[in-house]
Image (cartoon, coloured by chain):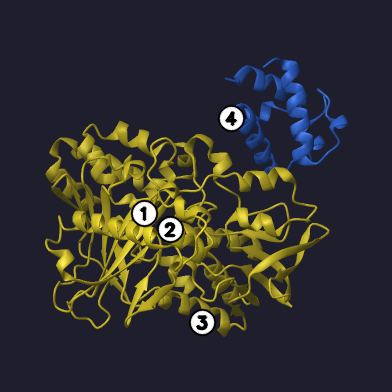
Chain colours: A yellow, B blue
Amino acid sequence: MNDVLIIGSGLGGLECGALLARRGLRVLILEGSQQPGGCMQSFRRAGLDYDTGLHYVGGLAPGQAMHKAFAELGLLDLPWQRMDEDFDHVIIAGRHFTFRQGYEAFAEGLAKDFPHQREALQSYVQRLQHITASDMDVSAYDYLRQTFSDELLLNVVSAAAMKTELRRESLPLFNFAHTCSSYIESSWRLQGDGNLLVGKLIGTIREAGGEVLTGRRVVRLSETDGRITSAVCANGETYEAGHFISDIHPATLCSLLEGCPSVRKSFRRRMETAENTCGMFTAQFSIKPGALRYFAHNVFVYDKPNVWTMTEENDPVKGVMISARAPEDGSDSLRQIDLLTPMPWHECEAWADTRVGRRGDEYKAFCREKAAQCLTLAEQYIPGLRDMVEQCYTSSPLTYRDYLGSPEGSAFGMRKDCRAAMLTFHSVSTPLANLLLTGGSIILPGIEGVTMTAFETCSKITK
Amino acid sequence: MTREEIIAEINAELAEEFEIDEATITPDAPIYQTLELDSLSLVDLIGIVQTKYGVLISKAELPTIKTFAQLYDYIEQHQK
């Protein structure tokens, strides 16, 4: 029998699997779709690999936020490439700013553009380095308002936080800071696609005698005396284990727990009625060979300083992240570029009843128009970009919903709310003694958040 | 909402959500034992009160709510 059965092979599920396998436990991961990896998976078109959710990672240098965790997971061996010293560029209403790696350098760099806010910037980077769980109750937007009197600077320091859902009324400082701070420590790109990371974690699990099975959609969990005893798949197969970890959306998990007497309605309702964060629209382009030099930084372009309200006013597109794919052959010719922008569910809800590849011409036209709007903004940084592109592949929240099972195509999982932190930051424990939660909905989203959560989840088994 | 209306509504809701006999809910009954609350399901109780009445029980005040009567008092005093 397996020691641990994990439902879902997103980053959280694979990290839990690798951590537990390294501690000598026999792990089985059941993945519903045909490809493992969740948001870390990549897809191949016309000879090029495109990532779905992996763009850059922060804090991998020794002593920094993610170094120890990635070392323990065996992920530091991958070909990480340190990004430019000016790792993020921000363009707002035509003005150009840069974020420099290192807290002091970050503050000093921006102080050149905002000399009257030098002290505020120093206070800001100090605060980022001293974030605690009590900051789950603190509003990120209110904190920034109190810290920066210059409205433009408030927008600039928030501009690269497109990696989370910027929402004035609810986003906790805890989330905002974790979205920003490790990248300021140091920023890294993988020289290759996300499947490298997925393959590495699966390799660790298999080396320890574990297994990752795809095409195994779990449809029911069975309980005996307050413990889950087995998982039943849609194909009729049943798997037993001592511990179970869910790396699927908690609301979806609740549907597997129908008939479990230990799970009361109150728990189900809290999970099923929780709000989800917005999704993302991504336009991924292949670039004509030799047309554009690779750049090892991200660029965030905004039409105007409305970074905190843009998600709800983003039609037409008013802000975009430009992410360049590190060439695997070491050349300086850029072959792939991603443009990302937040997209609330209501923008694509009209096609909610459709599935991948069968959404119709209106949807295709909608995606083409969005991609064109993203290109227009990106051309503020790369003039003539639209003439350099060969192919364009788009994905919307519908794509994420259908491939990853993320309700409403949510990109960052269940929403956290500083006004109700107790209700929106979740425990990894459940009413069932041997069923634990992991993934981006539980505590923090993103690579750092999911990794932190995986360690917390595993600590409940290995303590 | 009057206190009587709050009592009738929240008792029915808690009995339904925590799957217990409503008759066991009396004003002086200990809330933790009656609802069989642990640290996890305590969050569910807070969620129900917030969803139903828009009243968020703060961490600081949570320890002061030990009986159902104290829960009714809290909702009555804080409802909008």
- Name the residue at 58% across, 41% down: A423
User: Which residue bears the numbered disc 4?
Assistant: B56
Separation of marks 4 and 3 at Cα, in angstroms: 46 Å
User: Which residue bears the numbered disc 2?
Assistant: A446
Asked if marks 2 and 1 touch (Cβ < 8 Å), the reply is yes
Where residue A59 sits: x, y (%)? Answer: 35, 61
Separation of marks 2 and 1 at Cα, in angstroms: 7 Å
Separation of marks 4 and 1 at Cα, in angstroms: 29 Å
Q: Are callouts 2 and 3 both on one chain?
A: yes
Where residue A331 sits: x, y (%)? Answer: 19, 81
Amino acid at the residue labelled 2 = Gly
Amino acid at the residue labelled 1 = Lys
Separation of marks 4 and 2 at Cα, in angstroms: 28 Å
User: Which residue bears the numbered disc 3?
Assistant: A203
- Name the residue at 83% across, 58% down: A225
Secondary structure under tag 1 reads helix
Mark 3 vs 1, N-terminal side? 1
Mark 2 vs 1, N-terminal side? 1
In the image, taking residue A32 as reference, residue A319 lies left or right, namely: left
Write down the chain letter for disc 3.
A
Q: Are callouts 2 and 1 both on one chain?
A: yes
User: Which residue bears the numbered disc 1?
Assistant: A163
In the image, taking residue A160 as reference, residue A68 lies left or right, namely: right
Secondary structure under tag 3 reads helix
Secondary structure under tag 4 reads loop
Asked if marks 4 and 3 touch (Cβ < 8 Å), the reply is no
The residue lying furthest to the front in this view is A361
Where residue A353 sits: x, y (%)? Answer: 52, 57
Q: Quadrant of residue A362?
A: bottom left
